[in-house]
Each structure stands twice: as structure tokens, then as C-alpha cells.
């Protein structure tokens, strides 16, 4: 094990990886038609929004652990 | 759909197909390596950087069958078909976490397959065999479905699909060409073709999502039309989920995400990268394809709004393109779909060939095999695998391939404990994992058959019924058995078999600060 795996600050950041699971697997959060965005019901644009959001979270973790 | 041959579309289709064939053969000389070695033929020499890996895994994971099947499901049932979107988002945190570790240990020990890793980690050739056979079994129907993708667009062009074997001639030609250049060039061929395929698919989808809604009155109108159609249709359809669909939707997304990178073809894509850091960067960048997939899914609603009527939902995308696009662009977009089938089909057959050669042939039949003979065996196996898939599609109903691919998803998920737990702990045991695997395989298959090959099983707890994706139920049972039995074996003080890896093998070097 290298030092970073024992560093508690570096370890916390891994929790960011769980966030998309919560956001997308709990359906009551987003099974709604409104508000719409550019014609897309909420159910759809919410899911699309999680794509860049997940990339961003991964990037933040990446910067910390690489 | 059938009827007159669309000559302009056909000419453009054939032209692109020919271009890609040339690329497939040229690829052997690209970043040249000694193709008489399995890691050169079957992993491209582990030389692919961030950009090539992005195209390769993108072309490999988001397959042609996806382009046909996801809109077909959305066309037929609505929001439920969108589980593909959460699935292809939540897969990436897992890839980011686990796959660089897998890459590191595989690179250090010269492993070419996931089963190689399992063999080295647990010192059990039987567990490795279980993982290898599961991988091959899950991949075969997947290759067959890529053929269905080609078949659908060829049929829509007005050729083939007719009675007798001449109707299947275009498909046979396409596949023979694929088989020969995969044999010659190995993983380099699909890697090179993936560039062309992905650029074409991006162009088609961007054109579709920009142009089609303009003709249909905007996205608001598209969703409204779909809503009206589903309300008239009734049943478990709609542009929003019914509360009873929450659990199936979420568990399908979760189970599919956990299964995705256990398949031999996706794992081959990951292992062919040049460093663990390449995989991390790709976990960040690959979601771009998920946006594309989401837009492709919406094609299902556009087809409803455009009033496309089809005999089978799988014809929805070609029918929509024919209805909306000019002929030349129909040819271009169909070529994109067909070439999109070749890339994953090639990588799948390579992945299956690597498994057979490394974890069945070399271990159980010919342990003294030379590196050159190993590469040669893999090439031959890749031919057999593809021929098998072709024969399957030509002589058996398509529904068999669809059913088997569904089963394949839950089967491959049963290799999750052996591969993933092994990446993070040395405390799980081969015997326990083997029993867990058997429980998952048998239990999962039984549940599938008892529901008439539906993906979801109504699990009854305390008199309440919870509809859950079967792969998740079987996987949870597998995981539980693996962990509990391992703990018991450890407590009993039984010595584990030799683990040839050490903790440091899994860790990537830190970037200099």
C-alpha cells in the first residue's frame, strides 16, 4: 500500500463515486414530467444532466488520487 | 420495409463497407508488433493511449445492436427502456475504481484475460475455467445479435432478407470479410475501424437529433405525441415510469452496470490500454457516448411522432431514417450501423478466443504450448466463434439469440465476486467463490426459466412481492455465499492456495508533483 491509501483525506474523496448511484437509482427523485427543459420532461433531462455531473465527480477524484 | 432496392443508398453503403475492409487489413501494420504473440494479436500489444482506447471501448461497449434495440424498446414501452441511461452512467465510477487495478495486476503478470487474473490470484484453475466458460457463453449470443443489427439494415436497403440462402448472402459476405481481417490483424483491426465507425455514428445521431425534431415540431411535440400514443395503448407503458416499475428499472440499471465490464470484449478493451491512467481518463471521458445513447433512445419517440409503423420494433430506426433522410444519407447512416456491428463483433470474438486459448487450451490440454502456437490457436478460435454465431443467426430464430443474450447478462454477472472481490482483498477463497458462482448460475437460470425468460423475477418477502432484475438476485446470493464460506474457511484455518500476486501489484504509480 502506498502512503496515499492510508491518508484519510485522500480516502474520503472516493465517496464521490457513490453519489451518481444515489442520484439515479432512487426513482422518486426524478420520475416527474415537470419542470420541462427545451421540451424534455424532467425525467429525461435529469438523467442527461447526470452524465457531465458524473464526469465532473470522477475528474475531482482523479485529481486527488492520481 | 422490403420491396424496391434503394440503389443510391446501397452504393454508399457498399462504398463505406469497402473502405473499412481495406482499413481492417492495413491495421496489421499499424503500430506493428509481432502478431505471433497472443498479447500482440489479442491485446494490440497493450499500446493504446487515451484517444484510441476512447474510440475502441466506445465502439465496443455501445454496439450496433444497442442502436437498434434501445430505440425499439423505447418505441414499444417508453420510459422503462431508458434504464440504459442510468446504466451507462453508473458504470463509470466502478470502471474508475476497479479497472485500473485490474490493468496493473494484469500488466505485471502478463495476464491477457480476466480468468488469467483469477487463476493467478486464487491459484485455482477450476475457478478460472468457470470464469472463462461463463465469459465465452455470455459472448456468443452477443456476437449473434450484432449480426441481427447488420441484418436489419441490409433488409431495410431492400436486399437480402428474402427466402432461401441467397437472401442471407450479403450478411455472409460481410461476416467473412470481418472474420478474415480479424484473423490477420487481431485487435488492431477493430481499433482502427472504431475511429471511422464512431465518427460516422456521431454524425448520424447529431443529424438525426437536429433535423428530425424540426420536421416534427420540436422536442415538446415529440414527447407529447409519444405520451398520447402510450395513453391510447395502455398497459405498462408511458413516458414516465409507473411506481411498480421503479424497482425493475433501478435493478436492471445496477445489474447491467456491474456486468458491463466483466464481458470479455469490454475487458479486452480495458486491458489493451497502455496504462492504468489511460483507463481513469477514459472513465471520465467515455460518458460522452452515454449522451449519444440517450439521444439514440429518443429516436424511439421520434418514430412514434413521425407515425412510423413497423412489423417488428427492431425495424424502427431504419424505418425512421428512410422516412426522414435523403437517400444518400440513409446509405451513410446504415453503413454506420453495420460497421458499428463489426467493431464489437471482432472484439468479442477476440476476447472469447483469448479465454479459450489461455484458460482452457493451455491449462487443460497443452500446457507446453509455444507463444506462436498460442497466438495461432486464438486466431483459429476467433474464426470458429464467428462462424458459430453466423450459423446460429442463419438457422435459428432471432428470438433465441435475444433470450440467450438476456441469460448471458445474468451469467456474466456471476463472475463479479471472483473478479471484483479479488481486486480488493486476498481474503476470499477459490472454493467459496466456485460454490457462490454455481449458486448464482443455477439459481439465476432457474428464475429466468420459471418467468418465461423475462429479465425480472417477483421476489416475495413477507407476503409482499418485489420485482427485481434476476441478475441482481442471483448475484447477491452468489456474493453472500462467497463471503460467508470464505469467512468459514478462513476461521477453520485451511491454507489458501498459492496467490502469485502481492498488494503492490494492484497499485498505480503516482503522478510526479
Image (cartoon, coloured by chain):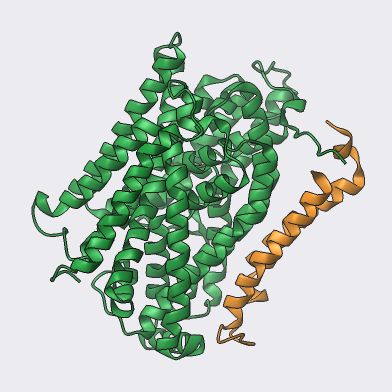
Chain colours: A orange, B green
Residue ID at (58%, 63%) = B86
Q: Is residue B463 visible?
A: no
Q: Position of residue B9 (x, y in %)?
A: 25, 67
Residue ID at (68%, 52%) = B93
Residue ID at (60%, 29%) = B432
B449 in relation to B49, above or below: below
Q: Residue furthest left?
A: B164
* Snapshot quadrant of residue A15: bottom right
Q: Is residue B495 visible?
A: yes
In the displayed structure, does residue B250 sit left or right of residue B425? left
In the displayed structure, does residue B144 sit left or right of residue B455? left
Report the quarter where the C terminus of chain B lies: top right
B232 in relation to B237, above or below: below
Q: Nearer the viewer, residue A63 or B469?
A: A63
* Snapshot quadrant of residue B67: bottom left
Q: Position of residue B45 (x, y in %)?
A: 54, 29
Q: Nearer the viewer, residue B215 or B168?
A: B215
Q: How many marks?
A: 0
B234 in relation to B9, above or below: below
Q: Nearer the viewer, residue B130 or B82?
A: B82
Residue ID at (33%, 73%) = B321
Q: Position of residue B442 (x, y in %)?
A: 44, 40
Q: Position of residue B323 (x, y in %)?
A: 29, 79
Report the quarter where the N terminus of chain B lies: bottom left
Q: Residue furthest right?
A: A8
In the displayed structure, does residue A36 sit left or right of residue B61? right
Amino acid at each position: 500500500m502506498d502512503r496515499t491509501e492510508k491518508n484519510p483525506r485522500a480516502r474520503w474523496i472516493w465517496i464521490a463515486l457513490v453519489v451518481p448511484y444515489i442520484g439515479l437509482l432512487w426513482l422518486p427523485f426524478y420520475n416527474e414530467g415537470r419542470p420541462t427543459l427545451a421540451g424534455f420532461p424532467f425525467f429525461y433531462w435529469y438523467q442527461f444532466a447526470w452524465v457531465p455531473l458524473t464526469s465532473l465527480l470522477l475528474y475531482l477524484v482523479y485529481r486527488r488520487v492520481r | 420495409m422490403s420491396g424496391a432496392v434503394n440503389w443510391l443508398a446501397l452504393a454508399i453503403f457498399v462504398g463505406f463497407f469497402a473502405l473499412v475492409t481495406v482499413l481492417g487489413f492495413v491495421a496489421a501494420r499499424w503500430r506493428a508488433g509481432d502478431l505471433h504473440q497472443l498479447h500482440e494479436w489479442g491485446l494490440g500489444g497493450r499500446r493504446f493511449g487515451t484517444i484510441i482506447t476512447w474510440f475502441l471501448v466506445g465502439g465496443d461497449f455501445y454496439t450496433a445492436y444497442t442502436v437498434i434495440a434501445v430505440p425499439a424498446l423505447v418505441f414499444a414501452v417508453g420510459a422503462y427502456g431508458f434504464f440504459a441511461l442510468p446504466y451507462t452512467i453508473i458504470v463509470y465510477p466502478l470502471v474508475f475504481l476497479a479497472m485500473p487495478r485490474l490493468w496493473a495486476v494484469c500488466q505485471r503478470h502478463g495476464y491477457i484475460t480476466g480468468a488469467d487474473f483469477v487463476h493467478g490470484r486464487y491459484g485455482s484453475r477450476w475457478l478460472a475455467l468457470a470464469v472463462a466458460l461463463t465469459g465465452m457463453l455470455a459472448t456468443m449470443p452477443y456476437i449473434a445479435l450484432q449480426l441481427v443489427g447488420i441484418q436489419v439494415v441490409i433488409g431495410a436497403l431492400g436486399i437480402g432478407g428474402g427466402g432461401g440462402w441467397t437472401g442471407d448472402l450479403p450478411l455472409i459476405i460481410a461476416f467473412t470479410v470481418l472474420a478474415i481481417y480479424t484473423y490477420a490483424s487481431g485487435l488492431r483491426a477493430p481499433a482502427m475501424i472504431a475511429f471511422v465507425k464512431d465518427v460516422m455514428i456521431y454524425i448520424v445521431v447529431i443529424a438525426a437529433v437536429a433535423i428530425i425534431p424540426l420536421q416534427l415540431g420540436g422536442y415538446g411535440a415529440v414527447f407529447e405525441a409519444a405520451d398520447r400514443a402510450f395513453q391510447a395503448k395502455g398497459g405498462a407503458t408511458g413516458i414516465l415510469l409507473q411506481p411498480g416499475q421503479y424497482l425493475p428499472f433501478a435493478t436492471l440499471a445496477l445489474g447491467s452496470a456491474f456486468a458491463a465490464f466483466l464481458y470479455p470484449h469490454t475487458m479486452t478493451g480495458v486491458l489493451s490500454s497502455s496504462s492504468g491512467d489511460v483507463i481513469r481518463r477514459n472513465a471520465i471521458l467515455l460518458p460522452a457516448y452515454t449522451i449519444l445513447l440517450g439521444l439514440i433512445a429518443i429516436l424511439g419517440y421520434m418514430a412514434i411522432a413521425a407515425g412510423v409503423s413497423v412489423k417488428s420494433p427492431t425495424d424502427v430506426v431504419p424505418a425512421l431514417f428512410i422516412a426522414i433522410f435523403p437517400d444518400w444519407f440513409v446509405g451513410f447512416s446504415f453503413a454506420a450501423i453495420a460497421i458499428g456491428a463489426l467493431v464489437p463483433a471482432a472484439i468479442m470474438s477476440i476476447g472469447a478466443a483469448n479465454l479459450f486459448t489461455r484458460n482452457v487450451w493451455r491449462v487443460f490440454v497443452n500446457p507446453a504450448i509455444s507463444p506462436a502456437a498460442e497466438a495461432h490457436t486464438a486466431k483459429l478460435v476467433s474464426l470458429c466463434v464467428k462462424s458459430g454465431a453466423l450459423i446460429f443467426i442463419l438457422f435459428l430464430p432471432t428470438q433465441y439469440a435475444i433470450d440467450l443474450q438476456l441469460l448471458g447478462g445474468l451469467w456474466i454477472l456471476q463472475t463479479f465476486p471472483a473478479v471484483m472481490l479479488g481486486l480488493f482483498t486476498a481474503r476470499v477463497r477459490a472454493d467459496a467463490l466456485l460454490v457462490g458462482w454455481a449458486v448464482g448460475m443455477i439459481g439465476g437460470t432457474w428464475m429466468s426459466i420459471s418467468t418465461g425468460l423475462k429479465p425480472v423475477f417477483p421476489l416475495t418477502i413477507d407476503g409482499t412481492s418485489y420485482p427485481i432484475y434476476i441478475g441482481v438476485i442471483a448475484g447477491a446470493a452468489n456474493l453472500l455465499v462467497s463471503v460467508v464460506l470464505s469467512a468459514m474457511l478462513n476461521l477453520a484455518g485451511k491454507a489458501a492456495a498459492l496467490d502469485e500476486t502481492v498488494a503492490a501489484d494492484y497499485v498505480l504509480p503516482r503522478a510526479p508533483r
